[in-house]
Amino acid sequence: MSSNKKYWKSVEELNENSSVVETLQQKEFAEEIPVDEFLGDKGSLESSKTSRRDFLKYVGFSTAAASLAACEGPVIKSIPYVVQPERIVPGVANYYASTIANGFDFASVLVKTREGRPIKIENNELAKSKGGVNARVHASVLSMYDANRVKRPMIDGRNVSWEEFDREVTGALDGVSGDIILLTQTFASPSTTKLINEFSEKYPNVRHVVYDIVSENDVLNAFQAKYGKRAMPNYDFSKAKTIVSVGADFLGDWQGGGYDSGYAKGRVPTNGEMSRHVQFESNMSLTGANADKRIPVTPSQQKAVLAALYGYISGGASTSNLPAKIDDAVVKAASQLRDAGNGAVVVSGIPDVNAQALVLAINEALGSAVMDVDNPRMTRQGDTEKVFQAIEDMKTGSVGAVLMAGVNPAYSLPNGEEFAEALAKVDVSLAFSMKPDETATLCKYVAAAPHYLESWGDVQYTTSDFGLIQPTIRPLFDTRQFQDCLLKWTNNNKSYQEYIKETWTGNIPSWIQALHDGVFKATSPVELGGAEVSETFNVATAASALGRPSEGTGLELTLYTKPSMGAGEQANNPWLQEMPDPLTRVSWDNYLTISESDAKALDLENINVSNGALNGSYANVIVDGTLVENVPVLIQPGQAKGSVGLALGYGKKKGMQKEMQVGVNAYPLYKKLNPVQSVTVEKATGMHEFACVQLHNTLMGRGDIIKETTLEVFNTKDVHVWNSVPEVSLDHVEKPVTSPEVDMWDGFDRSIGHHFNLSIDLNACTGCGACVIACHAENNVPVVGKTEVRRSRDMHWLRIDRYYSSGRTFTDDLEKKENISGLGNSLVEFAELEEPADNPMVVFQPVMCQHCNHAPCETVCPVAATSHGRQGQNQMIYNRCVGTRYCANNCPYKVRRFNWFSYVQNEEFDYHMNNDLGRMVINPDVTVRSRGVMEKCSMCIQITQKTILDAKREGRVIEDGEFRTACSSACDKGAMTFGDINNEGALIREKKQDDRMYHLLEYVGTKPNVMYQTKVRNTTEA
Amino acid sequence: MKKVKYRHSTSRLLLLGVAFFISFSVLGIAQEGASQESTGDGQEQTNESSGGSSEADTAASALGDPAAGKSLFNSLCAACHKPYSASIGPALHGVTERREMEWIYSWIKNSQELIASGDNQAVAIYEEYNQTAMPAFPQLSNADIDNILAYVEQPKPEPQAAQSSGASASGEASGGGVSVNVILGILVFVLVMLLAVLFLVNKTLRNFAKASGVVVPEKPKRKPIWKAFVENQFLVLVTAVFGLLFIGYFAYGFFMQVGVDKGYQPIQPIHYSHRIHAGENEIDCKYCHSSARTSKHAGIPSLNVCMNCHKTISEVAPETATAEYSKEFYDGEIAKLYDAVGWSPSEQAYTGEQEPVKWVRIHNLPDFAYFNHSQHVSVAGVQCQTCHGPIQEMEVVYQDAPLTMGWCINCHRETKVRMEGNEYYEKIHEELAKKYGVEEVTVAQMGGLECAKCHY
């Protein structure tokens, strides 16, 4: 049942005596307007030489000056093309299919360009389940307009021309003694592989070493051993009935990521069925947050869990020495897996070749149709041993040249300093780099590399699925891509574009079609990752090796990647820095996540200061003698006791704007590229100030925001039981709040024309945050920076609220209390009741303006700057707004955002909107807001209006599915459905009639046009 | 902002009023002048036409009928040839002296055949004009060709004719101004004289009185009028109220026109005359402003669009020149286009040296207002002139409409939505027609007054 469960956003809210929570519930704006700050105190006012008369003089003069100046507008120049390209019509967007392949993210994208400049990344819907267009991919367009890029080739820090660069480099390569090491990212590109082979023919001493910053070495090794190909198995989670994950964050970046859309399809209850997902993990990950059942286990226990699971599935008895509770969960999971037939799948993120081999064996034993080994993923090729061998060779001096492309080893290797020393011993060091990063600054030669939106390329996602990269803008700087350089240096006069075309001619039916679609199916003309099958792998030995984990004494650290930052390729991207982590809701930082009990033991604490901002202790983290100092500590509900977590990708210093140099670099702890390490954590002095939106926008104590039920209740009980419409009293008779007679307002007829509704399915939403960034890009939402976010002044129009709840309902709690027998038992169970933070359940809820038909904000605006349209949109008129903020105070959903400052061309907010390059990403169809006005989600009225206009121009009726918003088209999970409720047969009508449908705070009577679908959890145990 | 001309500014209206008043009072004289001017024009026209026909007569006797030749030339040859200067093909004037008539006949009827036959002259001219093949005209008889040649062999008309007519026209125009000024001057002079006479008479009378000893009785000293005014508090109050209202009215008027640039007529880097293109030559607006059909921007045409025509039109016709702008001036502006686009008229080739033209934008909407041309042009079928004024008459474009929100809204209130034949509107039209009980729905009834239709 939904209504009597306690949801909380922060541990602080569980503290009944917290004054902070109380304050925030009473006030919309936690801080008073800092009048003293800009007026100064009495003393300084009195000592000031400016008298009241002077002040009035200044005011008078400036008013007169301003009004005089206003009489003359500026002369605006319009400069048309001299020769206009045929396909460019000013004011009309063009779309091109392309592919991002930066070594970490591989995804097929659609690039929206205006007047020849890319402004937004969208899903390529022709590409079926090819890598996820996640938040980072959506944000990647801004990384191109980065003012800190390398703008031209350099030798010893001196700008040179490409002719000189070619001459110098080929001269140096010809004269090199010893090996030439080509250290690159995973390109997964047939043409690049072919080209590197040709390069090796010219220079026989070339050694190509592929280095994945975040390694998938173990799964690659396991797969190679079993199937003879250096690849990763592919999974189709939409076919899954039971998913058991042991430490695999497969909704995050696990094995290349992009599995979330398939997963979400299986999560929506259809015909009374949905998949069951059991997660064993140590860090609270996005995947664990979405699981039906989550068991916090330490990394070493994970191995035992996997071994035990294998034991149970293969019919053996339990041999594990796991705690009884965990063992019980494993037994149940195993039996559910067996029941699920070929819909069962086990995945694991344990960085151990035995574990990965065991996963392959288990899935094979289960006959899983979810795992696909015939068409495996090629998007990770890195070989850890070869990388470390290369560094050893560099140290001995047997290496004459190192060419690096797409990697930044000086930053991302655990032994970055050692690498730097080794690099100094190499005569010829060259980096193809977009940034003057840690590695590029060490290199003699720096080849300015273009962004993927300025490049050509081909990508092999899987054995039979391919994608093409095409440029969408002329290179902004004097850059040349890696492949073009290799072509030049192998005396090939072709451009890389021609080279790719030549690779594929004869292998695909139509080059133009492939380029148009961005994806195609084929067999690769160049073999990638081929290798022989090793001797038969003994699964039993692997299982027993796993089953006997070496018991470490200290805490166990699991390094992970955040959905926003990934491995840190785009650390200089303000959109990503400001995107709050889905779980901790912290932006602009990484931190050590720790369980509450461990934190207590180590005397580490998190406190909320008076305005709701979060402070955390610092800790020193030591792995194997390597010390990382002053890591902020964040207490994470659900973190397994005895484990800690830390995100990679932060703490970059070189080639970064000062504001973006945040967080600590966790790569020194990434020993042997193994994310699991045994650590010692010590308290350090000082408190860290987090920019956490955790306690912001509390809902005035109105807890009934989430509706949640179980699959069992959903299937068996009446809808009124689990999704009842709230009732209000009219003449002492309880009436549903939706009935017209209880309404204070006279409704309008909304059945004519379009009327837009948005449905958000809490079951399909994984909380990934792609919509947040898409909204940022589409609507020119400003970045405000860490200090402003800390002051609750974040500007996201769309936020994804994360709610924790204890795993039980209140009724369950009561039941449990009644059934307690005996003292011994009661102590344990009471303790459990008191510790909801140990292993909470999580719900993600995207919240944007609800576009209420009876909007509270509209009635309080003194200047009618916010009004209601017939199409259901609550309109915010910036040029009319005078900034009273009454509307924000009166909004029950806390979705209105105030421009406290001008965030454009303001030195105080030195992000992309403060430089000419960064402003190129601004969407010309949306106003850039100025200081002192309110803004909020417009339901992407610029997109709906464009859809309508297109239809009018073409003289046709608008089909269902044509209307979309930035968030609904960014969500490849299908969690967001947008459409015209007056269009018969529209999907959104079905959604509105759905039993699961509810409105946020329905009893307020706002009649929102945004609806939610009740979260259903599959709690069915075997 | 440089404001060259305000069409309807107050001072202008005042001046016009005064001028009207004066001209009214001297109606008789003005009418006389006007009738003289019109007869002068008529005489000139007859002179011109008679001159032309006499020239044609002489040419016809030599080759054929130049009048018939002119129409043939314009329909078949003018795309690539000009009589007196090289274009895509060579100048045709003097061709009868350069070539044999038989050669000309065979060349025109099928030039490729002639080239293929290895004729030296033919091959040479083919090479000279970048191997641009001239289409064959087998349909032309020798007589037709004679007519065309008769037309092109007419001697180049002396530019003086146009100049002199231009000069006379300007003379007439300024003549009108002078005459008004002269009348005004005379009037002022007469008034001054009258005043002087009055003063002198008065003085003389006083002198007479003094001399004859007549004592003019002293008027009793009255209370000064300002003092009386100040003492009457009611009057002060009323005056103050009216004064404030007066000031308020004008202050409001002043502030309401801030940022309204109606009449804004900046000087453009190239003097592009919409009068010539859209007016005289009746080129469709959307031929050049093509994106008005599909985009929110009407778009300033890129220079390659200009070159579609101006590749062959390197100079204006003499008739195009006006009193204000001579033919040389217009030709100079076309030369500016060639400089910008990098076209060498002498070599008939692009040099590749381009210099984008920095036009001054006239119609500026604020950033927070969204306006889409295609919505109005393609969907609603609104004429460009509805908002941009008589663009086909504008030598230099100015902003005709105030482009204020009130102006937009007014039109949205009054305009009926054009729905016929547009499937999109079928359902909504039916429903709205029922709701409002009208057959035709206005933009406002469609929701065209909602804020966020234009502000987002």
Image (spheres, coloured by chain):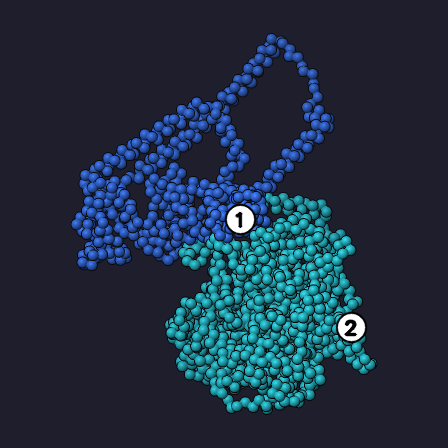
Chain colours: A cyan, B blue
Compared with A371, A57 (above or below) is above
- Residue furthest to the top: B212
Q: Chain of mark 1?
A: B
Relative image position of residue A412 (x, y in whole percent): 57, 77
Compared with A317, A961 (above or below) is above
Q: Which mark is residue A431?
A: none
On the image, which quarter does residue A261 sit in? Answer: bottom right
- The residue type indicated by label 2 comes to Leu
Compared with A452, A346 (above or below) is below
Q: Chain of mark 2?
A: A
- Secondary element at tag 1: helix
Instruction: Say which residue appears at 69% left-offset and 16% top-offset.
Output: B220
The residue indicated by pointer 2 is A814
- Secondary element at tag 2: helix
Q: Nearer the viewer, residue A438 or A722?
A: A722
- The residue type indicated by label 1 comes to His
Compared with A497, A222 (above or below) is below
Quarter of the image with the C terminus of chain A in it: bottom right
Relative image position of residue B187 (x, y in whole percent): 48, 23
Q: Residues within 10 Å of mark 2 (few under 14, many from 20)?
A: few
Q: Is residue A793 visible?
A: no
Q: Nearer the viewer, residue B403 or A915?
A: B403
Q: Is residue A966 visible?
A: yes
Number of numbered discs overlaid on the protein picture? 2
The residue indicated by pointer 1 is B429
Instruction: Say which residue appears at 64% left-offset and 72% top-offset.
Output: A290
Q: Is residue B440 left or right of residue B241?
A: left
Q: Is residue A635 left or right of residue B131?
A: right
